[in-house]
Image: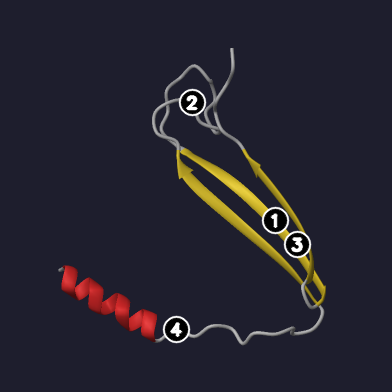
Amino acid sequence: MKIKLLIVLNFFILNTYAQIPGFMGKRFSVGYSNYIMLAGLGPTANAGDKNEVFTGLNTTHCLNLEYTIRNRTNFCFSFQTLKTGVSYQ
């Protein structure tokens, strides 16, 4: 099993190519990511009563803005928000 996995990984490694280096001009890019994490036992963000024990999912929303103006100059803005069921008493 380990040999087969090693062969498959080597196949993918040998067939990947890097991006051509150099400045590709001014560009603006917007990215969005959503990360999902298992909450396990305990209060979650979508639980109605914080004293009850639920299993659920916590999510993180990420927004990325990037603007490249010249070689080696890049302006970035990133915003992340998440909700968990953790409450402090």
**Is the Cβ of the residue at disc 2 closer than 8 Å to that at disc 1?**
no
- Residue annotated with mark 4: 16
Q: Quadrant of the C terminus?
A: top right
Q: CA distance from mark 3 to mark 1?
A: 7 Å
What element does badge 1 sit on?
A: strand
Q: Give the foreground label among 4 and 2.
A: 4
Residue density around tag 4, few if under 14, some if 14–19, many if 20 or more, within 10 Å: few
What amino acid does circle 3 point to? Leu
- Residue annotated with mark 2: 43
- Residue annotated with mark 3: 65
**Residue at the spot x=53%, y=20% of the render?**
50
Q: Earlier in the sequence, mark 1 or mark 4?
A: 4
**Residue at the spot x=58%, y=21% of the render?**
87
Q: CA distance from mark 2 to mark 3?
A: 33 Å
Q: Earlier in the sequence, mark 2 or mark 1?
A: 2
What element does badge 2 sit on?
A: loop
Residue 33 coordinates in the image, percent (x, y): 60, 57
What amino acid does circle 4 point to? Thr
Q: Give the foreground label among 3 and 4.
A: 4
Residue 63 disc label: 1
Q: Earlier in the sequence, mark 4 or mark 2?
A: 4
